[in-house]
């Protein structure tokens, strides 16, 4: 941190506005996460409003994730080039413009441009700058508080999104959410001066590594695209892909092509460094063990969180029959406990090192997941479910209280923007993997459990088993028991056998949900292996500069 920047921070503190910058930065983080959650629960209304299909809306959501993930590293580098606060402001303007277009979008194409492309690019500028600005504005215990608040607000946005989106979509219109975002963005721009100025530049202005940017954008886009589409395309066996390669689904080939481009990206960056040029990413920073562990844990945290937030709403909405608003109410304990525990970083930092806190967080997550497994029953126990959700939020909040601070405190001031890009790239990859891998496992477990159930039931005839087998071959979706009953009746299955098939499917649903939740437990357990190089010193108790 430069002398001028330190002076700005001290001056803000004396003026009683030391935490005003966090109001702007935390609001931006909350807004970015809330946006996606709202869009996910508004799918059915969007289908109706734009006279389209679910797959088209899912493609719009996929494109948003692709744009954001692909440009995150480049967005971080731009912060080094023209200043983090300036890039943050430009990102907010871009994001607000996208929100305005989305709120008045007359067609699906305009929605895709406004939300997926423009808002996605805005988020790719805002988030890396946000991470670096928190590190540059706060120090010591204050920095731990700030990262705890930002991390907690990210989790709160994921949990509050379905509640807010469900209510607004049901009783008003989804367009109001995006119109409201424009108002919030304008308000943040009006108080942007609350964020201290960037320290003066001491060397020449970095240039943008155009070749590296193109390789990273294309590589990350292909990897994320393949992962996100694995559920609809299939991993190897084709389900519903736009094309096949040697009879196989294109998923693995698309991911492999992305990995090849990322390998070329790394080779190019090494070439740039050897010739004295400015690379997009200095891969030398990844040799810092705490940084590697922090990024790995951020990826794992988002994989677990988004995997569970893919599975739990299915249980609440499809199995229990709750609407989006009722589902959001039952997710509120996650939001509340995550926000509180995420802000506990400085207090915990007085007694325990980040590695200890993260390991405790993983243990709490394991308890929450085991508890959650016990609540997946035909009839929900709301009290037990609420406690499981509260423990889940507690564990996630403890992780959030440490990881952002660990990542940014592992490097010097000059590397914070690019590390911010890596930080949010890891989080986006974790989110994509969580949805795709847990989603694929859920559907695979559902098909296997349903097959086992109907084969072992003497009340179901061979002809009905054959019909069910043909239906499974065509592809299986996680639908309600009532939809299965309607399908069986339409196919002319006798009433007694229909009851048996519906019962078998209901049992298979619960087994598949438990398998998916159990998988997140396995990932949580594996997370302990990545905690080895986390700091053993109390970060909150020292001044990392």
Image (cartoon, rainbow, N blue to C red):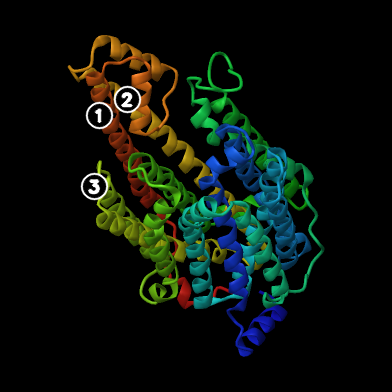
Earlier in the chain: of badge 1 and badge 3, it is: 3
Residue, disc 3: 374
Residue at 61% from the left image edge and 78% from the top image edge: 20
Residue at 54% from the left image edge and 14% from the top image edge: 247
Residue neighbourhood size for the residue with mark 2, other residues' Cα within 10 Å, grouped as few (<14), some (14–19), many (≥20): some
Under circle 2, the secondary element is helix
Tell me where residue 180 appears, x and y as whole percent: 63, 61
Residue at 54% from the left image edge and 55% from the top image edge: 168
Residue, disc 2: 448
Residue at 25% from the left image edge and 20% from the top image edge: 495
How far apart in space, not on screen, are marks 1 and 2 (Cα)?
15 Å
How far apart in space, not on screen, are marks 3 and 2 (Cα)?
21 Å
Residue neighbourhood size for the residue with mark 3, other residues' Cα within 10 Å, grouped as few (<14), some (14–19), many (≥20): some
Which numbered mark, 1 or 2, is in the foreground of this view?
1
Q: Is residue 226 in sight in this rendering? A: no
Tell me where residue 127 appears, x and y as whole percent: 63, 58
Under circle 3, the secondary element is helix
Tell me where residue 415 appears, x and y as whole percent: 65, 61
Earlier in the chain: of badge 3 and badge 2, it is: 3
Image height of 212 relative to 51, above or below: below
The N terminus: image quadrant: bottom right
Question: Which of the pair 133/315 is nearer the observer?
Answer: 315
């Amino acid at each position: 941190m430069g002398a001028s920047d330190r002076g700005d921070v001290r001056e803000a503190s004396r003026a009683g506005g030391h935490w005003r910058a966090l109001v702007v930065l935390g609001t931006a983080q909350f807004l970015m996460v809330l946006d996606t959650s709202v869009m996910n629960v508004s799918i059915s209304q969007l289908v109706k409003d734009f006279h389209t299909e679910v797959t088209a809306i899912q493609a719009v959501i996929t494109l948003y994730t692709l744009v954001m993930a692909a440009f995150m590293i480049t967005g971080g580098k731009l912060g080094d080039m023209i200043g983090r606060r300036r890039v943050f402001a430009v990102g907010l303007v871009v994001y607000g413009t996208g929100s305005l277009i989305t709120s008045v979008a007359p067609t699906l194409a305009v929605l895709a441009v406004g939300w997926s492309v423009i808002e996605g690019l805005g988020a790719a500028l805002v988030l890396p700058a946000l991470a670096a600005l928190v590190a540059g504005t706060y120090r010591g215990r204050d920095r731990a508080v700030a990262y705890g608040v930002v991390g907690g607000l990210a989790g709160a946005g994921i949990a509050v999104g379905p509640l807010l989106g469900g209510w607004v979509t049901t009783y008003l219109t989804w367009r109001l959410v995006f119109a409201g975002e424009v108002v919030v963005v304008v308000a943040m721009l009006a108080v942007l001066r609350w964020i201290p100025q960037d320290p003066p530049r001491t060397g020449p202005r970095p240039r943008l590594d155009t070749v590296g940017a193109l390789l990273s954008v294309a590589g990350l886009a292909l990897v994320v695209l393949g992962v996100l589409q694995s559920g609809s395309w299939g991993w190897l066996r084709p389900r519903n892909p736009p094309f096949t390669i040697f009879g196989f689904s294109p998923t693995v080939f698309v991911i492999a092509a992305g990995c090849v481009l990322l390998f070329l990206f790394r080779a190019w960056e090494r070439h740039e460094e050897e010739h004295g040029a400015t690379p997009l990413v200095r891969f030398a920073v990844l040799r810092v063990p705490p940084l590697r562990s922090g990024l790995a844990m951020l990826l794992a945290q988002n994989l677990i969180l988004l995997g569970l937030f893919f599975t739990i709403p299915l249980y609440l909405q499809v199995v229990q029959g709750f609407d989006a608003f009722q589902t959001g109410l039952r997710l509120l304990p996650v939001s509340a406990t995550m926000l509180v525990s995420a802000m506990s970083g400085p207090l915990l930092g007085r007694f325990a090192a980040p590695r200890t806190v993260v390991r405790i967080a993983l243990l709490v997550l394991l308890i929450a997941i085991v508890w959650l497994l016990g609540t997946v029953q035909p009839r929900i126990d709301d009290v037990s479910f609420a406690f499981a959700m509260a423990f889940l939020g507690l564990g996630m909040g403890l992780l959030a209280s440490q990881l952002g601070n660990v990542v940014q405190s592992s490097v010097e001031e000059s590397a914070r923007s690019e590390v911010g890009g890596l930080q949010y790239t890891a989080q986006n990859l974790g989110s994509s993997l969580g949805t795709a891998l847990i989603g694929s496992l859920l559907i695979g477990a559902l098909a296997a459990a349903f097959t086992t159930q109907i084969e072992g039931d003497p009340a179901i005839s061979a002809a009905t088993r054959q019909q069910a087998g043909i239906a499974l071959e065509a592809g299986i979706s996680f639908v309600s028991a009532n939809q299965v009953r309607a399908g069986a009746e339409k196919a002319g299955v006798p009433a007694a056998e229909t009851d048996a098939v519906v019962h078998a499917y209901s049992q298979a649903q619960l087994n598949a949900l438990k398998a998916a939740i159990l998988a997140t437990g396995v990932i949580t357990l594996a997370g302990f292996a990545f905690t080895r190089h986390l700091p053993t010193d109390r970060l909150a108790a020292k001044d990392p500069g």
